[in-house]
Image: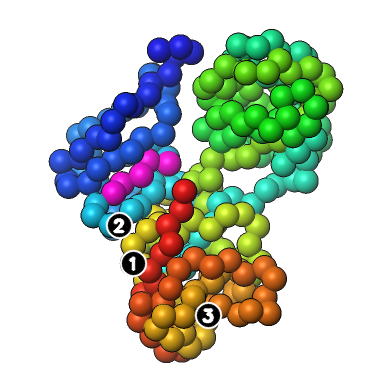
Amino acid sequence: MANDVKNFSQALYNHSGYVLYFPEIAVDSDLNWLDQPVEIYEEKSYPLFPVGTRAVQGNEEWVYCENGGTALTIAAPIQQAAVIHAELPDDIVVGAASAIGAYTVTLTSTANLATAPLSTKDGFKNGYLIVNDVDGEGELYKIKGHAAASGTANFVVTLYKPLKTALTTSSQVGLMQLAYQNVIVCPAVLTGAFIGFPQIGVTADYFFWCKTKGFAAADVNEAILIGQQVVVGITAAQVDAFDVTSTVAVIIGTAATVGVTDGEKCMVKLSGIG
C-alpha cells in the first residue's frame, strides 16, 4: 500500500442488504462502516460512511453526501458545491517543481484561494487536482489532503497517486471539491454537476444518502407528462419538462408519473450519475 492508502478490490456487502462501493480512503480513516446499517431515510450530524460511498440495491443507487450550510427540502434536486472563485478551475500557479513519482504538489496561494474551504486544512480532501496547462496538461489526480491556503504563500497538496509527469513552475492546475461534499440545492442556472434527490429533509451540514439512479420523487415547477424528459437548471429547487429553447437545462431522466402542478411531486426515472 503506497502512500498509506486503502483500496478495495471488490464490492462489500452490508448486512442491511446493500452492496457498497467505497472511494479511495486513507488507512487511518475511521472505518466504522462495516457495522453500520445503510439507512437511506436517516441523516446524521457525523459521517457513518466515507463521503462518496455508493450503495446499490437492485437497479437503484444512492451516494453518501455531506450537506452544505443550508437545509435541503425533500425531493428538491441537488448539485455539487458551486465553484467559489474563478481561479479554482484553472490557472493556479505551481510554486515549486515536482518530479515524476512525487505524491505532493506545491501551489501558490492568492487572495481568492485563501478563503473557505480551501483556507482550511484538508477542505478539498478527496476532491481533484487537474493539470490545466503546460507540463502534465490533462492529467487528473485525487487529493488525499492539503495544507491551508494562506495569503500568497505556497501550500502543499498531497495526492493519492504519484505524478506521471514532472510538473514545473510553468505548469498550471485547477482544484475541485469532492462533488458530494457541501452539496447545495440546484439553482435556476446550475453552478455545478447535478447529483440527485434527497430522500428526506436534510439539516445543514448533516450527512445523508442521496438517490442517484432508479426512481426518485421530484418537486415539479409545472405540469409534466408521463414519458417526457425531465430537466434541472430552469427553476431553482424544482424540475421542469424539457424545453428545446433552453440552452442551460440539463436532462436528468424521464417522468414516470404525471407532474400535476407547481409544488407537487412526480416520479422521475433517473439516468444515473457516473
Pick the front one: 150 or 29: 29
Name the element at disc 2: strand
Which of the marked residues, 2 or 3, is nearer the chain's N terminus?
2
**Looking at the rendering, which quadrant does residue 34 occupy?**
top left
Q: How many marks?
A: 3
Identified at 32% across, 26% down, the residue is: 9
The residue pinned by badge 3 equals 241
- CA gap between label 2 and label 3 equals 23 Å
**Which of the two labelled residues, at mark 2 and mark 1, occupies the earlier sequence position?**
2
Magenta span contains residue 54 = yes
Residue at coordinates 82% horizontally, 19% vertically from top-left?
169
Relative placement, left or right, of 7 versus 192 is left
* Residue bearing mark 1: 215
Disc 1 marks which amino acid? Phe
- Location of residue 238 in the rendering, given as x and y in whole percent from the top left corner: 52, 73
Label 2–label 1 contact, CB within 8 A: yes
Crowding at label 3, few (<14), some or many (≥20) Cα neighbours within 10 Å?
Answer: many
238 relative to 64, above or below? below
Residue found at x 25% / y 43%: 19
Q: Which residues are magenta?
A: 52-56
Which of the 4 quarters of the picture holds residue 192? bottom right
**Residue found 54% across the figure and 71% down from its top:** 231
Callout 2, which amino acid?
Glu
Q: With 30 as the anchor, is 142 left or right in this view? A: right
Amino acid residing under circle 3? Ala
Residue 256 seen anywhere in this rendered image of the structure: yes
Residue position for label 2 = 60
In the image, residue 228 lies in the stretch drawn in magenta: no
Q: Is residue 198 above or below residue 36?
A: below
Q: Residues within 10 Å of mark 1 (few under 14, many from 20)?
A: many
Pinpoint residue 167: horizontal percent, then vertical percent: 74, 18
